[in-house]
Amino acid sequence: MKKYLYLLFFGIIFTFISCSSSDDHTETISVASSRATYYDPELGRQEPCFLIKKKPNDSWDGSIIIDNFNYNPGFEYTLKVQPTGFRTEYQGYVCLKVLSKVQKKSDNLPSNLWDK
């Protein structure tokens, strides 16, 4: 019986430790007012991607996926996001909240990323 109580106790402790708040892994990013393209070797063609910045003075970088995000060209967004955990040469995100949406043309945008 003690054996089962210990297993139950450690199971409960492990559950509380392993379940962390989503706020622990959130980031704030800017999304540019237009998209760029990147070369997808699996498809053999250029595909659209979001242009993002993690800090205001950073240069624009690409992100192919931002789930739960309704993008409208011509607006620059500030988003609270959570990384998807899927890592390759790009970073994917899940949008938790749109912090701002401003109609403007973003500066210094690249036209394409990761050329063939």
Image: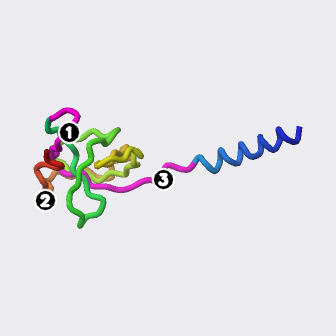
Q: Position of residue 6 (x, y in %)?
A: 81, 44
Report crowding for label 2: few under 14, some 14 to 19, many 20 or more residues within 10 A (C-alpha): few
Residue where numbered disc 2 is placed? 107
Q: Which residue: 54% across, 50% down?
A: 21
Observer-nearest residue: 68 or 64? 64
Taking the image as shown, residue 39 lies to the left or right of residue 29, namely left
Q: Position of residue 32 (x, y in %)?
A: 20, 51
Residue where numbered disc 1 is placed? 40
Label 2 vs label 1: CA separation? 25 Å
Label 2 vs label 3: CA separation? 30 Å
Q: Which residue: 13% across, 59% down?
A: 107
Residue where numbered disc 3 is placed? 23
SS of the residue at dot 1?
strand
Q: Check residue 30 for magenta coloring.
A: yes
Q: Position of residue 8 (x, y in %)?
A: 77, 40
**Circles 2 and 3 in contact, beta carbons < 8 Å:** no
Q: Which residue: 49% across, 49% down?
A: 22
Of labels 2 and 1, the one closer to you: 1
Magenta span of residues: 20-44
Q: Amino acid at mark 1?
A: Asp
Observer-nearest residue: 3 or 58? 3
Q: Position of residue 18 (x, y in %)?
A: 60, 48
Q: Earlier in the sequence, mark 2 or mark 1?
A: 1
Label 1 vs label 3: CA separation? 32 Å
- In this figure, what is the number of numbered marks? 3
SS of the residue at dot 3?
helix
Q: Earlier in the sequence, mark 2 or mark 3?
A: 3
